[in-house]
Image (spheres, rainbow, N blue to C red):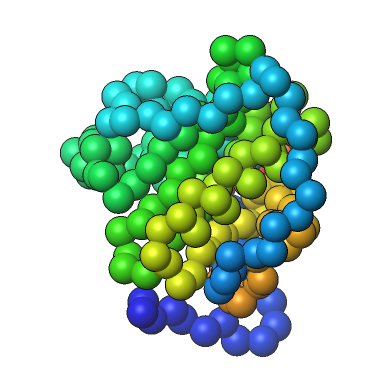
Amino acid sequence: MTEHLILPDGYSFVPPGKIANVETRLEMLARPAEKAPHPPAESLSLQRLHSPSIADYRALFRAVGEEWMWVSRLEMEEEKLTAILSEPLVEIYRLTDDGREIGMLELDFREAGECELTFFGLVSDAIGKGAGRFMMNHAIELAWSRPIRRFWVHTCTHDSQAALPFYCRSGFVPYATLVEVSDDPRLTGLVPRHVAPHAPLIEP
């Protein structure tokens, strides 16, 4: 397991140009009990993307995550990203509504006995309409169809405030909190300056 620095009690100064992000990690250690089915809209469809191009993948990644400063796959070297996109143990799905892309789901089975819900999100105008529950139900079924012992996910303070309670309602339980300090991607050009107004932009 990766070693992490333990922060001292009290306040820690974050330099201008940097952002602090509090991450919550959650896990599910058994398949949840089946609930009454949530009738999906007939227009919703979840499709697996097999070895998508970097351009197509990043376009979907931006459409879903730019507002929440998802940047890990934007700054990743193309060679490394290509390897992930073509990895059989990484499953990438897109959610469409009448053919329009409105969400993405990524499952990583590379760690034996585990599945990480690496990315899960919807475009902003699809939130709160049942599409997230439809996609999560599929994610849980896909994950536990494999011989895993643990299904886990992380969310953070850059994400929608609805994300954490949604994961908890879905059966995940928080088990760890981490703090990350990094360059503000709105200042490095990875994402537009106007995104994520919930996170103050403080220039150096």
Q: Is residue 139 left or right of residue 133?
A: left
- The residue that appears at 57% across and 71% down in the rendered structure is 30
- The residue that appears at 56% across and 73% down in the rendered structure is 29
The percent coordinates of residue 147 (x first, y second) are 39, 65
The percent coordinates of residue 4 (x first, y second) are 44, 79
Question: Count the marks: how many?
Answer: 0
- The residue that appears at 64% across and 33% down in the rendered structure is 122
State the quadrant of the N terminus.
bottom left
Q: Is residue 115 above or below residue 17?
A: below
Residue 19 quadrant: bottom right
The percent coordinates of residue 105 (x first, y second) are 51, 40
Q: Is residue 175 above or below residue 90?
A: below
Q: Is residue 125 left or right of residue 193?
A: right
Q: Is residue 180 left or right of residue 163?
A: left
- The residue that appears at 63% across and 46% down in the rendered structure is 136
Camera-side residue of 189 and 65: 65
Residue 73 quadrant: top left
Camera-side residue of 202 and 103: 103
Residue 103 quadrant: top right
Q: Is residue 118 above or below residue 125?
A: below
The percent coordinates of residue 62 (x first, y second) are 51, 29
